[in-house]
Structure formats: C-alpha cells, structure tokens
Amino acid sequence: MNRRRWIDLFLGGSLLGTAVSLLYPVIRYLIPPRQPEIAAKKLAVAKVGEIAPNSAKLFRFGSTPALLIQTAEGDLRAFSAVCTHLTCTVNYEGDTETLFCPCHNGRFDLAGNVISGPPPKPLESFEVEISAGEIFVSSKS
C-alpha cells in the first residue's frame, strides 16, 4: 500500500466518522426510543368537591396528560390532554367552555369534538365515575 492510498483511506474514514457522529444525535432526536406504556385502567383523580364548577384539573393517565373537567352545570368529563394535531397539551378555558390547543389555535367542545383549527380528529375521552367520595377515571376500551 502506498502513501497516497493510505491517506485516501484515512481521510475517507475520518469523514465517515465525522458524518456519523453528527447524524447520530439528530436521528436519536427524530426517532426517540420507545418507552413502555404504563397500563392505567382506572385511576383515582380527585375527591368530590375538589374541583370547582367550570374548571379543570390536569393529571397523568398512564404516561400521558389528561384533563378532568367539571362543567358549569356540574357534569364531570375527562379527556386526553394531548392535541391530535401536533401532540401539544390542551387547556380548558372556562369563559368559552372549550378545550384550547395553544400551538395552532385548535379548539374542542366539551364532547371532545373539533370546533376549529387544524386538529384532524377528536380528543380521546375517558369514563368518569364517583365512588366512595372519590372521582375515578378509566379508559373506555
């Protein structure tokens, strides 16, 4: 092997190593590792009377955020707080009685349906039940 061939291999290997070391973190960021989902079937979220009428409480259902809403009429509803557009966290706005996604002005009604904005589908809803003075939220499936 002559010097020229050795320098070509050395520089080519260095370039390849540099490219890999720069692309690896970008790929890891774009494709995050899968985390096991914590299977939450039923969860005690709050005590009866803890949530004021026309307000909401943010909680974790498994590994995702969720909202428990008490409407102005006193009904309890629970939804996934993950927007179906870009997975931003939605908030409850009591003055308009809607769920609002601040990322792209998506709005959902109190049934989880899309009112306006770019979200392609409704929010996932959960079952709410009251037992022994506590409010329980469970998945519908």
Image (tube, rainbow, N blue to C red):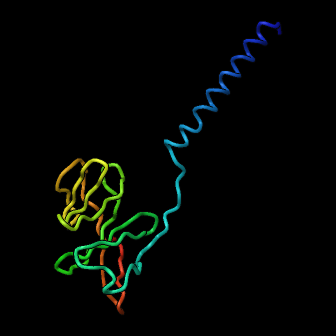
- The answer to which image quadrant residue 42 occupies is bottom left
Going 18% across and 66% down the picture, which residue do you hit? Answer: 95
Seen as rendered, the residue at the extreme bottom is: 132
Quadrant holding the N terminus = top right
Residue nearer the viewer, 109 or 100: 100
Seen as rendered, the residue at the extreme front is: 95
- The answer to which image quadrant residue 64 occupies is bottom left
How far across and down, in percent of the image, does residue 105 sit? Answer: 24, 50
Quadrant holding the C terminus = bottom left
How far across and down, in percent of the image, does residue 69 sit? Answer: 27, 73
Going 25% across and 78% down the picture, which residue do you hit? Answer: 76
Instruction: Say above or below: 85 vs 52.
Output: above
Residue nearer the viewer, 106 or 24: 106
Going 35% across and 58% down the picture, which residue do you hit? Answer: 89
Say whether residue 67 is left or right of residue 3. Answer: left
Residue nearer the viewer, 78 or 13: 78
Going 36% across and 53% down the picture, which residue do you hit? Answer: 87
How far across and down, in percent of the image, does residue 57 sit? Answer: 34, 72
